[in-house]
Image: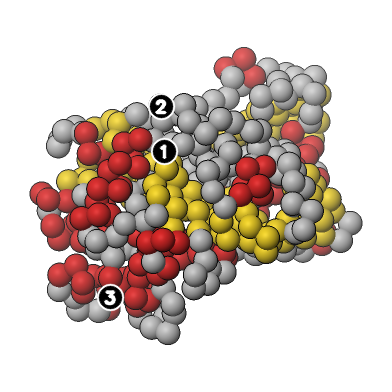
Amino acid sequence: MRAEQVKVTGWQGRALALARDIVYPQSRWWDAVTSVPRHVLVPRWFTRNGTGPWELQDGAADEQAWRAAAYDGWQTLITKVGAQHADHTRPGTTCQGPPTSSATQPSLAVAMYRHARIYDGADVLDVGTGSGYGCALLTRRLGSEHVTSIDIDPYLTSTAASRLDSIGLRPADIITGDAAAELPGSYDRIVPMVSLPGVPASWLAALRPGGRLVFSLTGGSVIITADKTPDGGAEGKVELSGASFMTARHAADDEPQPAVIPEDICDADGEDITQSRYPVVDPTRGWELDAMLSVVAPGITCRSDTDEQTGITTVWMACGDGSWARATGDAEQPATVHQAGPHRLWDILDSVRHRWLTRGALPLRGASVRIDPDGTCHLNQDDWHATIPGHPARSLTH
């Protein structure tokens, strides 16, 4: 039953409606979802229309809107933009920049815990404390002694700890540090609410024998689950469902760099001018294409523009090694493609599209995964293979 079909009063009623929306009454997460006052953990947040400025929403100023947002199972609440946290923003002001922290939508948090196959008595590392909501669910479900949370931002960890304490939840530890660094403990489950470009070796070192990790790949919607093997690595698969998270920061003042297409390639001829076998497409608007490119060509930036009068679309692609591509055309005709640099980015995209169209599916979802102790991921399905390098080691604190 959807939440809007349920008559609710007070936060307990909202939490009950949320639980009905994202879990079944028989679920082991039911009691946790119904008993955590999420609004206490997210008193302020940001919203925006399209690409406009971020506007502060102050829960105390509109309690009805506060409860509606806090107990919406399908809404992620942005709590930090760039270096500006909602708690420190004056009402009526706006800000610009990329989101850097949030309260993950409840349905996605529970989905990640299901991927982890969390059992009673499991010691869990919650990666990305954020607002503390995920930590709250875990603590309510497992008990305080079984939950450790980590975040790079000292304001987030201290504030989450204080707000959790105010609702009677005291996890074993909330660590301020880099989750990609050496971890001060061992765990049965590691579950992130952030993404990384590769699996940190520290996760494998901290995972107990038979333990399980969940991993979200930066740049796509790829979720990997794997169980630890006796050699210190892990084996698992790419999940059929996907999810996208903010990239993990490695310092409290880190801000993600905006995706920028270099001006000098916007109209350049390039080294090769060819015709694609297919019409122009923006891969970021195709869930499967975007996910596949995040594995076979990580770090690509894309931008598109369509002339409303002619219907002609131009897509630019670029990556840090100097490779770039520009494709122009309409939805019916093969695109004209300009490319340059060490790699032909549009050719890579077209090879992915060709496999998709000729075989009816891409091999990423459901692929087998073998993770080496250093974090290197080897993906395999049928005749397709790919490798994701492990995440480089870092120091715990900054």
What distance separates the C-alpha of mark 1 from that of mark 2?
13 Å
Q: Is residue 354 above or below residue 85?
A: below
Residue linked to disc 2: 253
Dots 1, 3 in contact, CB < 8 A: no
Could you say which quadrant of the image residue 86 lies in? Answer: top left
Residue 259 pos. (x, y %): 53, 30
Name which quarter of the figure residue 66 lies in.
bottom left
Instruction: Give the structural element (helix, strand or loop) at label 3.
Output: helix
Residue 52 visible in rendering: no
Which residue shows up at 25% across the image and 79% down it? 6
Q: Residue at x 39, y 35 (%)?
A: 153
Which circle's residue, 3 or 2, is located before the other in the chain?
3
| Horizontal side of residue 303 vs 11, given as left or right | right
Residue under numbered circle 3: 16
Element type at marker 2?
loop
Which one is nearer the viewer's eye here, 298 or 151? Answer: 151
Query: Which numbered mark, 1 or 2, is in the foreground of this view?
Result: 1
Residue 357 in the image: state x and y as whole percent.
77, 57
Q: Residue at x 64, y 33 (%)?
A: 393
Give the amino acid type for the residue marked by disc 2 in the picture.
Asp
Tell me the amino acid under the disc marked 3: Leu
Q: Which residue is mark 1?
A: 176
